[in-house]
Image (cartoon, rainbow, N blue to C red):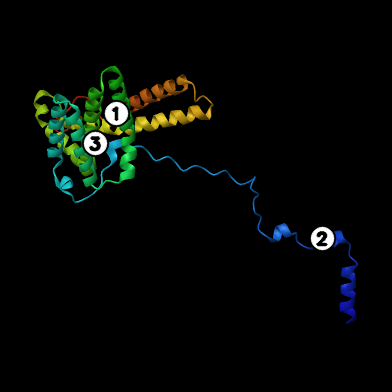
Amino acid sequence: MTAEFGSARSTSEQSPSEQSGSAQPLSAQSPSTPSPSTQPPRRRPARARWTGPLGLYTPGSTWLHRLSPGYKIAALAALSVVLTVWRTPAVGLSALGVAVVLLLATGAPLRQTSRALLPVVVVGVVLGVFQWWSRDLSAALAVTGTLLALVVLATVVTVTSPADRVLDTVVRAAGPLRRVGVSPEVVGLTVTLMLRSVPLLVELAWEVRDAARARGLERSPRAYLVPFVLRTVARAHRTGDALAARGILDGEDPDEEPR
């Protein structure tokens, strides 16, 4: 009893500073929570890469999916000639309606497809307004309807045909060019580079715009055009150097056996 009383008394006689020094602070016992001012700012989710109508392949079992890419490309070429020769408002709008029905029948995701076709639709509408202002309403409907119909029909082909099968079809179709010294594989590679360059250039334009806005130059056309042109030319040079390093641009046929 005496020992316990003496220890309790010695504890009570300690100064407040000694008592606070012997006890752990509350902040050390509980996990620290950052204040709202010290919390890192929320980052916006990364913008999805725009692929355009060229990267919309959707697997399916419709009759359009089962149809060979060669027949679809040939039909698209024939319709392009027909719509160009008979360019009237009735033909253009009717072809646009049929193309939209075919696109819906493929089962393509509406959100992704709409996002891919939005820039083309905007260009078509602007072109139609210009035709209406410069000529008349009939010409505007004919040009806009024909343009959008061909783009939607081309989207139907890309939605229902894998890219590798389309390129194989292009290489087979370019087979007769071998007789005049043109390699079909080079033709297929050219088409591949073209299809790949379109979304890359669009993405490059978005990056240049974001960089100009970060520097506070969003109203300066030079801040957009100069970096975009320089980076586009630099990308083209890198692509050419990569092709030359692999011996693709030396004019030799890759199927020909070395002597």
Disc 1 marks a residue whose amino acid type is Gly
Mark 2 surroundings: few (<14), some (14-19) or many (≥20) residues within 10 A: few
Q: Earlier in the sequence, mark 2 or mark 3?
A: 2
Q: Which of 21 and 35 is in front in this view?
A: 35
The residue under the point 21% across, 38% down is 97
Q: Nearer the viewer, residue 107 or 99?
A: 99
Q: Name the front one of labels 2 and 3.
A: 3
Q: Residue 200: x and y, percent?
A: 35, 32
The residue under the point 49% across, 25% down is 218
Q: Which of 185 and 228 is in front in this view?
A: 228
Q: Is residue 161 visible in this depiction of the protein?
A: no
Q: Which of marks 1 and 2 is nearer the N terminus?
A: 2
Q: Residue 250: x and y, percent?
A: 22, 25
Disc 2 marks a residue whose amino acid type is Ser
* Residue located beneath label 1 in the image: 124
Judged from the image, the secondary structure of the residue bearing numbered disc 2 is helix
Res. 20 mark:
2
Q: Earlier in the sequence, mark 1 or mark 3?
A: 1
* Residue located beneath label 3 in the image: 152
Q: Quadrant of residue 143?
A: top left
Q: Name the front one of labels 1 and 2.
A: 1
CA distance for labels 1 and 3: 12 Å
